[in-house]
Image (tube, rainbow, N blue to C red):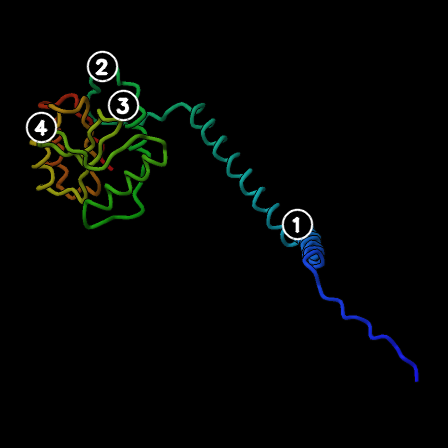
Amino acid sequence: MSTRKKRKKHEPTLGDAASEGGRLVLEGISRLGALTKEATQHRGWRTSRARYDEGQRAHEKYIRRSSTETALLPPPRPPVQGQAPAGQHLGNLGLLVAAIQEFQPARKYSSELPYQAELFASLKANHWSVEFERQRGHSRPDLVVLTIFAIEVKGPTTSGSLATIADKMLRYRQHFDHVICVLFDVQVNEGRYAEWLQGVMAQFPNVVVIRK
């Protein structure tokens, strides 16, 4: 009868566990590297990234081109009623008047607020520093540009609207260097409007009135 010695069962040691753990960590790192390489080489990812970069470059080019063209083009000189006031801000006043003259609302509105909001947005888009209803003393113009230009907006412009302007002009002139009155959708008899305009120009020769 053969006597075969029983092989002693190997008990795992702390060193074995450490070796196995190290092997698994290395495998994990290797697998992570392979997945990263595969992801960066994936056609869809590369296409999306390329399109994103192309869009960014186009946007930056448009901004640079718009800024350059705005700086190079001479400001338009639309017909404006009213005598420009003397002072150091005449250059900015002329540019602001031109910007307002060029603006056109999306449509006619039944209240004043949409006209104010659209004009505000248009000036902002053209890089003007503009605030909405900034109060000075007891005066609160619809818009204030560069802290010195007060803009009063009316629309639709009725006889009642015109009647309130003279009082506001008196108060605004105490707090702002220049006042611009913008009239949208004038619904007043032409004779009455001409008479009103003549009276305003006589009393406030430095106020600019823009009829839209």
Tags 1 and 2 touching, CB below 8 Å: no
Can you tell which of label 3 and label 4 is closer to the viewer?
Answer: 4
Pinpoint residue 109: horizontal percent, then vertical percent: 23, 49
Determine if residue 148 is in view.
yes
Which residue matches tag 2? 87
Which residue matches tag 1? 40
Tags 2 and 4 touching, CB below 8 Å: no
Q: Residues within 10 Å of mark 2 (few under 14, many from 20)?
A: few
Of residues 2 and 193, which is closer to you in this image? 2
- At x 12%, y 41%, the residue is 189
Tags 3 and 1 touching, CB below 8 Å: no
Can you tell which of label 1 and label 4 is closer to the viewer?
Answer: 1
| Residue kind at label 4, given as amino acid type | Arg
- At x 8%, y 27%, the residue is 170
In the current view of this chain or complex, which residue is farthest to the bottom? 1
Pinpoint residue 166: horizontal percent, then vertical percent: 8, 31
Quadrant in the picture for residue 2:
bottom right
Quadrant, the C terminus: top left
Can you tell which of label 1 and label 2 is closer to the viewer?
Answer: 1
Q: Residues within 10 Å of mark 1 (few under 14, many from 20)?
A: few
Which residue matches tag 4? 171
Which callout, 1 or 4, points at the residue further toward the start of the chain?
A: 1
Q: Residues within 10 Å of mark 3 (few under 14, many from 20)?
A: many
For marks 3 and 4, give the CA distance: 20 Å
For marks 3 and 1, give the CA distance: 54 Å
